[in-house]
Image (cartoon, rainbow, N blue to C red):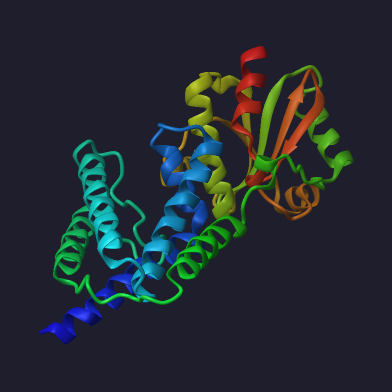
């Protein structure tokens, strides 16, 4: 039995690593899930999502490297209890039916996630907490925390959060033609060029919906949809996002205007383009300030 207890720690470590890596692979979904709770602003939600991944990676490495097992077990138990209470809360209030424990790799219901956490708690309590490394402990602690943090924040981290704004390419004559065609020369609006089948477009629609829920100016948002099925309502239902005013654009014109990169979000003030965003660059604070002014 004592030999089995030694290996339980490795199992716990592997589960935490798999959970963290699964979240990181589909980090945009996990960021959106945290933002959808409407507790923290977008930038904070993005950082918080990365910190959760870094924490899980660190716990996993601590178990695999047998570092400070007593302390690691306490932190693990505390985190599992907190996560379980959180899942119970979102299940009770019907906030979400998936807490993204394993990202998009394995979608578990809230009840299944709670059961998984209960099993992990039993594993933690029965694992051998005396069997741990005695050599180079400080070096291993530093290595585990540093590696976990670097991995979590290096993967698709939005550059605008640290003040780096990337140049966005699009067909300016095509956009000017569209503005004139839709009689927007004197309008102040946020124009979102969205494909109804694009993963990042769906996430962008969810983000824009949450931002608008804070500003409450739906009339200032216009969607330009590339929709093969001519069924915008299906897109809004699927993404559970706000059904803003929308127009359709044919495929060739859409791809030419956006340069094949979508979504493209244009901030228009009295017919003039004052800012552009791609999915990764959506700036909640800027958009809220803009909507409050117009």
* Picture quadrant of residue 67: bottom left
Nearer the observer, 111 or 1? 1
Residue depicted at 48% across the width and 32% down the height? 210
Residue 282 x %, y %: 63, 39
Q: Which residue extends farthest left?
A: 1
- The answer to whether 199 is drawn above or below residue 212 in the figure is below
| Res 74 quadrant in image | bottom left
User: Compared to 190, does 109 lie above or below?
Assistant: below
Indicate left or right for 216 with 95 as reference.
right
* Residue 231 at least partly seen: no
Work out which residue is located at the far front of the displayed protein and give it.
Answer: 135
Indicate whether 216 appears above or below 20: above
Q: Nearer the viewer, residue 273 or 132?
A: 132
Q: Nearer the viewer, residue 147 or 240?
A: 147
Residue 112 showing in the rendered view: yes
* 207 to the left or right of 281: left
Residue 40 image-quadrant placement: top left
Quadrant housing the C terminus: top right
Q: Which residue occupies the extreme right position in the image?
A: 173
x and y, in percent, of residue 198 in the image? 58, 54
User: Residue at image x 47%, y 52%?
Assistant: 29
Where residue 212 appears, x then y in whole percent? 52, 26
- Total numbered labels: 0
Q: Position of residue 235 (x, y in %)?
A: 49, 45
Q: In which quadrant will I find the N terminus? A: bottom left
Q: As drawn, which residue projects farthest toward the top?
A: 293
On the rendered structure, is 48 left or right of 191? left
User: 190 and 91: which one is in front?
Assistant: 91
């Amino acid at each position: 039995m004592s030999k089995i207890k030694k290996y339980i720690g490795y199992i716990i470590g592997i589960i935490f690593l798999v959970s963290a890596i699964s979240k990181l692979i589909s980090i945009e979904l996990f960021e959106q899930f945290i933002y959808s709770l409407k507790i923290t602003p977008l930038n904070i939600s993005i950082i918080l999502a990365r910190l959760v991944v870094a924490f899980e990676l660190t716990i996993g490495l601590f178990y695999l490297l047998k570092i400070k097992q007593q302390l690691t077990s306490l932190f693990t138990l505390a985190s599992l209890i907190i996560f379980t209470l959180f899942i119970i809360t979102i299940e009770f209030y019907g906030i979400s039916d998936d807490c993204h424990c394993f990202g998009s790799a394995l979608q578990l219901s809230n009840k299944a996630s709670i059961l998984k956490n209960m099993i992990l708690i039993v594993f933690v309590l029965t694992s051998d907490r005396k069997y741990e490394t005695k050599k180079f402990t400080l070096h291993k602690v530093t290595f585990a925390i540093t590696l976990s943090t670097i991995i979590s924040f290096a993967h698709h981290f939005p550059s605008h959060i640290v003040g780096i704004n990337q140049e966005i390419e699009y067909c300016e004559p095509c956009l000017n033609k569209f503005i004139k065609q839709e009689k927007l020369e004197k309008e102040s609006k946020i124009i979102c060029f969205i494909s109804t089948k694009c993963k990042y477009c769906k996430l962008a629609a969810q983000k824009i919906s949450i931002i608008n829920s804070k500003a409450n100016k739906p009339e200032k948002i216009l969607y330009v949809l590339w929709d093969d099925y001519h069924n915008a309502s299906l897109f809004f239902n699927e993404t559970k996002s706000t059904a803003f005013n929308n127009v359709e654009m044919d495929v060739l014109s859409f791809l030419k205007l956006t340069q094949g990169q979508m979504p493209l979000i244009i901030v228009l003030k009295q017919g003039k383009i004052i800012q552009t965003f791609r999915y990764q660059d959506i700036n909640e604070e800027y958009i809220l300030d803009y909507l409050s002014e117009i």
